[in-house]
Structure formats: structure tokens, C-alpha cells
């Protein structure tokens, strides 16, 4: 116990030393029990400052959940109090192990996916109403409808939800699906072969015309992953195939746009030192590596995508690497391509292994995110980094 | 002790016969410690009927052996590893190089402590040829196969990312064919398959890291003859978790292999992967009398039957604390239907927890294998275990 306290003290010292330019605040630390554990997801924030996300494990340990639990949807108020909004019951009646975060509609409903559980063990798409009642919108079978939705949902203005599954479809290479506002599920695309990309691992992005954009972790011309577009007629185009060289490999990030229709994302591997990249894809298909991670001190293996402020700065996380540890980092890449570390996890009481993308608050004064491991509890953290 | 073992054995043969067509199980050797212990590497049958193998423990120093068992079931220790320059804890089996000498790897020891490549020449002369050096090259080699005048193997650690390698030896020394990053591309590997064109196939960890997060449930990879690395399938759990090499391959290029867990009952699977990358689960172990945790890969006969071992499950037995001790199985196709048959369910005295790949002698249609535990329950205490394993043969 005495040892633990002294280690905790040293962590505070480290945090203080970084506070000159930005401050890392641990908002919540998961216990891995009924409160949830190991959050892989990004967070969303309402106008009152409450934060919402999913935790992969914890919650219910009974039934078919067992260790490490089937996961939860949580809310964190501005004072740091956590409330479990929903505890997944696990198979066969309910989903288990959400990887992605949630999205909200104007009525206050939450929508998301669980990667596993459901009646077939291949995951679910779910809706939670403001009263906390959950509806399983779809139980994935692992067959033609897809399976293991690692990515979350994206909503269009008509209330349709779109997502991708990592596996399933006619060839087992994954699918893209739609759940309309009435809850009717439709499979709208099956990745047919390696050339078209396989294993989409992130949430999709919609443009104003209703086209969907995403990444596949594998497949494409070099089997190192792709950036793809799926138009409204269900026709897919591979916009870019990663070679696995300096351009990157195995992307699993969601994509974002700037005002000029350039797409931005990350690759987990590849790049100059095989520690991953941040890339831009121009509308004409030209790919540019904006930054190649070296591993130390800047981080490695970015699983999350980037977010962008109005000045063109990008912010993101790396799952591994960092300064004197392998616990991951929070970074900023400014518009000129200069990378700076906002925080390097020590992998102890401060948390470790951020996997989700960051959230920038409306005033652009803080970013919010999660680390899936460690912290003052056992099992992951929600953090804030002030930018000024 | 011996008499009891034989009695159990006879009773089991009768029980097994009721399960399927007649098959015979023969215990070839029970390890007692000084002669070796805890076999976990594939066996090799020489043209003269001699079996060659390694044990990861036992021998004069308790750090493993290289051994032979002749046609008269006489076992002989060729080398007892000391943990010095010769290495320790061999996890690869023995194989014949193109020069007729025996080669193998030890997972530890050597000058850097990262394992060795060794040769056993005429007169059982042992030579440590190479001490693994670690990053950026390999450390902790776990498997070795012959590839013409080269040797190819896999290492559990080392490489630029400390996540394991596939390596090759020729006259110039060690070359890393692929170093795993430890993520979407995989992490470590074990038994390899090399086809006639020189392509390598293996199983690795990692892949989809949010399956059994944050580790991933493993994948299947290929390194083509030109050295290009490619991921052929990523496991997500319901289709299997933790694939194990070595795989086997049919004339059409389909790969067959096992996963330790996952599948319908989370007790392991046997799968087929087509050249187009489409995976079919041929069998999901229930974890009951049919076994669980198949670990030793597969062998395949000319009729297309697959053979392997399950680490646990099978006939419930006091020696295995009221659980099964593992078994040897056959998976046979009738059109698209695959049927699993238990060829032998271990009872502890005749073996327990088989780990290693089987060796199929095509000429006699006989399977040779080892069990990691079982046999002599008064064996050495060096490794904290109570039994040291056995060598057996089964004729399906």
C-alpha cells in the first residue's frame, strides 16, 4: 500500500511537469466491475457536459457473460460521477463487448453496436431510449448479413443508421448494412473478394450526397488495407490500396473530411519505421503521408482516427509507443505537419492504450478520450487534455 | 504400476473399438526424467524405422534432450541439453538436413540466452552451430522445417518489434524472412508448412485486437517464395481462436488447420481455408468425449482424412482429476460432411495432454505422437509436474 501511494505521487509529478502547455486530467477510472471495464470507444458529449461511451467488458458477469463481463454503456457527469445507462445481458438475448462508441439522435436515443453476443454470437446493433430501455435492432448471424461489427453506427438526416461488419457476408470478408428509422435491417454491400478490401474495422463516414466512406484493415491490391467509397446505388470503389510500405498498412480508423473534401485517417502499421502513419487522401485519389510514427517518443500503432479543428490541426491517439513506455500517446499534428505530444501514458495510475478517437469540445479548449487499460482502477480511464 | 497401465490400456482398446473401426494404440516409451520429459515437438520417423525427437525437459541437466527410439522400442538420449552454449528447452523436433545430419533448435540457452541452432552428426556428435542474438534477428526459436539446402523456422520473440519472426538459415547464417509488428500483421508463430513452390504458411496471434481484447484471436499468414508476406484469414472467435500450425494442404491448395478455442462450443475447431480466402469450419469440438483444445496441428492421408490430437477432453478419468486426458482423433470427409472419430482417449497412464503434431507414416498408415504428460506419475520434480509424458503410435 505504501508502495502504491509513492508510485501515485510520482505520477502526479509527471502530470505536473507536463502542465505548462497542457494538462492531462483523469476524469474517471474503471473498476472493471459493474461500472464497466476496458473502454475501447470514443466518447460523445452533450451540451450539459455529460460524456457518453461504451466499455468492452465489466457489467454483467452472469449467464453467458462470465469473465470479463459483457460490457456497458456509461455516462459521466461533469463532476466525474459515472452512471451505467445500460448493462449488456449477453447472449443469447442481448449483445456483448461493444468496441465502438454510441451516436445520438435528436430525441435522445443512443445507437451503437456490440462486436459479440446476440443470438448468434456475431454481435448486435442496438438502440437505447432515454428511459434506458434497450432494443436489439439486429442480431448478426455471421452469414450473409455480416458479423462482428467492430465499428459503430453513423446516422443520416432521415434517421437511417449505417455501419460495417468485420466478417460475414457471402465470402466472410465483411459487409455494410443499414438500419432504417423503423428498425428494419438491410444488408447493402458484401465485400466480395480481397481486391475490394476485407475486414472493415471502423465506423463509416457519410457525405452530403449519401455516399459512405471507410477503411478496410486488409485486402486491396496489396492486402494491406484500403480506403473505399460505397455510393447510394451500392457500388463500391477502392479509392486507395495501401502498399504496406511508407504509405502505411492495416488501417482501422474512421475517416474525416476537411472543407476541401480531403479525407484523413491513420494506419496502424507501415510508414517509415513500420509504426503507423497519419495520411490524407485527396479527392483525385492522391495519398499523402502527413506523419510517420517513430514509436518513441511519439507513439506507435494508432488504432483511432484523427479529429480536426478549424485551424487545420489534427488530434489523435496511439495505442502503443510513447516516451519511455509502450502505453500509448495523445498527439497533435499541426497544419504544417509538425507533431507534438500532448501526453504520453505511463501505463500505471494514469491509464494506458488509448484506442478510440478524440473528441474536441466546441470551444476547442480540450480533447476527451479513453484509454482501455490501467488507471487508478484496473481497467481503463476517461481523460481530458486541456489544450491551452 | 506397469501391470495397471496395461490393464487400463486393454480396457480402453475395447472401448475405443466400440466407437469406430478397429484401431490399435501402442505405448512406445514412457519418460522418467533422466531419459527426457515433457515432449512437445513433432516426431520424425527415419527410413530405418527409428523415431527421432526432442523433449523440452528432462535429461542429465533437466533442460531437455534429443533422443531416438529404435524399431525395438529402445530409447536412447542423443544429447542432454546443459543450458550452456548448446542451448536448453528444445521446442523444435529433429529433422534431416540435405547433408544427412540431424538439425534442430533449442528455445533457450546459447551464448546470448536466446536459443541455438544445433546439428547432430555421425556418431551422435552434437554441435551448436549458431546462438540466436535477438532483435533485430530472432530469439526463442520454436519450430524448424527443412527447405532444400536451407532450414526455415519460426521464433516466438525477437525481430524489430520483439513480436517474433520467421527465419531462414543458409550457409551465410540467419536471415529474418518476416518480423512481426505484433498487431494486424500477427504476433509470433509456431509450426510452418512449406508447399512444393516454396510458399510458407503459418499461424500467428494478434490480428483483430478487439477479439479477446487486447490480444486478438490470431490469423493465418503466407510468405510466398519471393518473400512477400500476406494475411490470409483473421479469426474473430466464433470461427475459431488461436490457430495452431502446422497446417496441411490439399492438391487444390486448400489449407486445413485447428484453433485451440473458439467455435460453437468455445472448445476449438478444425477449419478449411480456400485459396480465395474463404474459411469453413469443418468441426467444432464440444469439449466432451470428442475432446477440446486441439493444439498439435493436423496431418492428412492420401484419402483426405485428417488426424490430430486434443489437449484435453475425452473419456473422464480419475488420473486427470475427473476430466478427460486428451485424445487422438480422425476427421473424415463424406462429400461435404465431415465426421470426427476418437481413435484413442488417453487415461493418464498411457498419456495425458498431447501437445505435439502427429507424424503420419504413409507406408504403414501409422500415426506417431507424444503426450506432454502422463505415463510415469513418480517422475522427476524438476519441472513441478508429476509425470513426464509418453511416446505412442496409433494405427487408425
Image (tube, coloured by chain):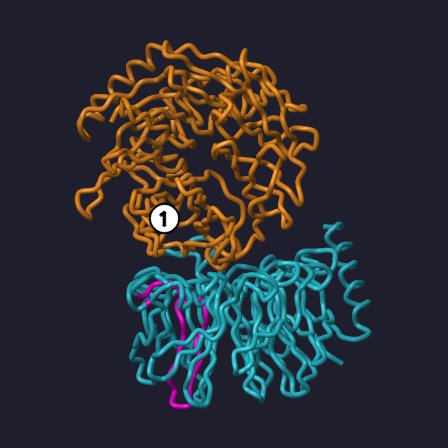
Chain colours: A cyan, B orange
Could you tell me which residue is drawn at 33 percent across and 28 percent down?
B360
Residue beneath the point at 52% across and 83% down:
A283
In-image side of B224 versus B281 (left or right): right
The residue closer to the viewer here, B101 or A128, is: B101
Q: Residues within 10 Å of mark 1 (few under 14, many from 20)?
A: many
Quadrant occupied by the N terminus of chain B:
top left
Disc 1 element: loop
Q: Is residue A100 visible?
A: no
Q: Is residue A168 visible?
A: yes
Residue B357 at what x, y percent from top left? 40, 32
* Magenta stretch: includes residue A148: yes
Residue at mark 1? B266
Magenta segment: does it hold B250?
Answer: no
Q: Please state the total of marks drawn on the protein image.
A: 1
Quarter assignment of residue B134: top right
Rendering coords of residue A257 (x, y %): 55, 83
Q: Residue at x 40, y 12 (%)?
A: B70
Task: Name the residue nearer the viewer: A210 or A125.
Answer: A210
B32 up-or-down from A286: above or below: above
- Quadrant of the rendered structure where residue B330 is? top left
Give me the residue at 57% from left, 66% from top: A267
Q: Which residues are magenta?
A: A146-169
Residue A376 image position (x, y, % from top left): 66, 60
Which of the two residues, A380 or B191, is positioned nearer the viewer here?
A: B191
Q: Main secondary structure of the magenta part?
A: loop
Amino acid at each position: 500500500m505504501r508502495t502504491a501511494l509513492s508510485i501515485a505521487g510520482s505520477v502526479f509529478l509527471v502530470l505536473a511537469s507536463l502542465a505548462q502547455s497542457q494538462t492531462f486530467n483523469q476524469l474517471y477510472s474503471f473498476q472493471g466491475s459493474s461500472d464497466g471495464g476496458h473502454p475501447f470507444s470514443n466518447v460523445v458529449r452533450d451540451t450539459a457536459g455529460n460524456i457518453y461511451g461504451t466499455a468492452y467488458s465489466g457489467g454483467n458477469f452472469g449467464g453467458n457473460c462470465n469473465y470479463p463481463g459483457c460490457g456497458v454503456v456509461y455516462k459521466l457527469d461533469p463532476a466525474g460521477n459515472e452512471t451505467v445507462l445500460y448493462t449488456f445481458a449477453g447472449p443469447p438475448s442481448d449483445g456483448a463487448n461493444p468496441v465502438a462508441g454510441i451516436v445520438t439522435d435528436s430525441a435522445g436515443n443512443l445507437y451503437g453496436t456490440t462486436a459479440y453476443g446476440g443470438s448468434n454470437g456475431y454481435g448486435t446493433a442496438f438502440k437505447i431510449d432515454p428511459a434506458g430501455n434497450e432494443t436489439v435492432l439486429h442480431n448478426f448471424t455471421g452469414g450473409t448479413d455480416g458479423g462482428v461489427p467492430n465499428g459503430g453506427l453513423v446516422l443520416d438526416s432521415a434517421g437511417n443508421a449505417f455501419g460495417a461488419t468485420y466478417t460475414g457476408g457471402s465470402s466472410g470478408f465483411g459487409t455494410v448494412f443499414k438500419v432504417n428509422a423503423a428498425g428494419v435491417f438491410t444488408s447493402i454491400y458484401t465485400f466480395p473478394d480481397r481486391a475490394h478490401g476485407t475486414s472493415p474495422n471502423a465506423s463509416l463516414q457519410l457525405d452530403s450526397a449519401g455516399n459512405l466512406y471507410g477503411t478496410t484493415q486488409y485486402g486491396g491490391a496489396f492486402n494491406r488495407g484500403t480506403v473505399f467509397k460505397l455510393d447510394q446505388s451500392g457500388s463500391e470503389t477502392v479509392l486507395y490500396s495501401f502498399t504496406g510500405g511508407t504509405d502505411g498498412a492495416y488501417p482501422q480508423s474512421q475517416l474525416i473530411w476537411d472543407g476541401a473534401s480531403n479525407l484523413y485517417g491513420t494506419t496502424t502499421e507501415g510508414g517509415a519505421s513500420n509504426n503507423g502513419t497519419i495520411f490524407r487522401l485527396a479527392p483525385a485519389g492522391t495519398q499523402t503521408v502527413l506523419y510517420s510514427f517513430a514509436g518513441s517518443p511519439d507513439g506507435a500503432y494508432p488504432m483511432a482516427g484523427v479529429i480536426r479543428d478549424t485551424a487545420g490541426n489534427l488530434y489523435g491517439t496511439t495505442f502503443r509507443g510513447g516516451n519511455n513506455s509502450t502505453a500509448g500517446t495523445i498527439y497533435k499534428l499541426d497544419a504544417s505537419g509538425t507533431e507534438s505530444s500532448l501526453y504520453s501514458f505511463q501505463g500505471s495510475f494514469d491509464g494506458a492504450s488509448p484506442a478510440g478517437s478524440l473528441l474536441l469540445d466546441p470551444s476547442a479548449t480540450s480533447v476527451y478520450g479513453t484509454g482501455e487499460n490501467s488507471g487508478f482502477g484496473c481497467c481503463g480511464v476517461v481523460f481530458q487534455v486541456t489544450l491551452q | 504400476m506397469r501391470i495397471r497401465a496395461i490393464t487400463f490400456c486393454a480396457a480402453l482398446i475395447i472401448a475405443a473399438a466400440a466407437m469406430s473401426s478397429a484401431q490399435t494404440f501402442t505405448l512406445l516409451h514412457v519418460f522418467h526424467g533422466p531419459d527426457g520429459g515433457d515432449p512437445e515437438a513433432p516426431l520424425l520417423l527415419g527410413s530405418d524405422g527409428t523415431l527421432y525427437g526432442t523433449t523440452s525437459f528432462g535429461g542429465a541437466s533437466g533442460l531437455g534432450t534429443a533422443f531416438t527410439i529404435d524399431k525395438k522400442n529402445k530409447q536412447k538420449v542423443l544429447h542432454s541439453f546443459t543450458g550452456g552454449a548448446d542451448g536448453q528447452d528444445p521446442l523444435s523436433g529433429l529433422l534431416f538436413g540435405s547433408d544427412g545430419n540431424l538439425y534442430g533448435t533449442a528455445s533457450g540457452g546459447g551464448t546470448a540466452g536466446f536459443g541455438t541452432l544445433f546439428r547432430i552428426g555421425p556418431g551422435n556428435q552434437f554441435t551448436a552451430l549458431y546462438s540466436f542474438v535477438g532483435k533485430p534477428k530472432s530469439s526463442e526459436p520454436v519450430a524448424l522445417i527443412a527447405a532444400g539446402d536451407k532450414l526455415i523456422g519460426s521464433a516466438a520473440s525477437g525481430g524489430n518489434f520483439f513480436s517474433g519472426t520467421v527465419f531462414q538459415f543458409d550457409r551465410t547464417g540467419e536471415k529474418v524472412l518476416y518480423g512481426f509488428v505484433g498487431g494486424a500483421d500477427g504476433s509470433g508463430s509456431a509450426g510452418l508448412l512449406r508447399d512444393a513452390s516454396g510458399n510458407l504458411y503459418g499461424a500467428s496471434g494478434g490480428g483483430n485486437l478487439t477479439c479477446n481484447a487486447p490480444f486478438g484471436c490470431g490469423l493465418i499468414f503466407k510468405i510466398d517464395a519471393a518473400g512477400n508476406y500476406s494475411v490470409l484469414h483473421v479469426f474473430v472467435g466464433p470461427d475459431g481462436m488461436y490457430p495452431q500450425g502446422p497446417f496441411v494442404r490439399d492438391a487444390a491448395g486448400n489449407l486445413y488447420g485447428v484453433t485451440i478455442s473458439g467455435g460453437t462450443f468455445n472448445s476449438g475447431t478444425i477449419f478449411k481455408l480456400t485459396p480465395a480466402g474463404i474459411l469453413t469450419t469443418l468441426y467444432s469440438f464440444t469439449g466432451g468425449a470428442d475432446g477440446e483444445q486441439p493444439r498439435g496441428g493436423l496431418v492428412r492421408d492420401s484419402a483426405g482424412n485428417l488426424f490430430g490430437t486434443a489437449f484435453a477432453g475425452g473419456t473422464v478419468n480419475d488420473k486427470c482429476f475427473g476430466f478427460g486426458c486428451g485424445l487422438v482423433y480422425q476427421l473424415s470427409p463424406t462429400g461435404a460432411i465431415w465426421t470426427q472419430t476418437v481413435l484413442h482417449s488417453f487415461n493418464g497412464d498411457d498419456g495425458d495432454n498431447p501437445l505435439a503434431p502427429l507424424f503420419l507414416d504413409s507406408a504403414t498408415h501409422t500415426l506417431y505422437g507424444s503426450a506432454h504428460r502422463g505415463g510415469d506419475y513418480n517422475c522427476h520434480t524438476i519441472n513441478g509436474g508429476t509425470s513426464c509424458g509418453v511416446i505412442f503410435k496409433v494405427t487408425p
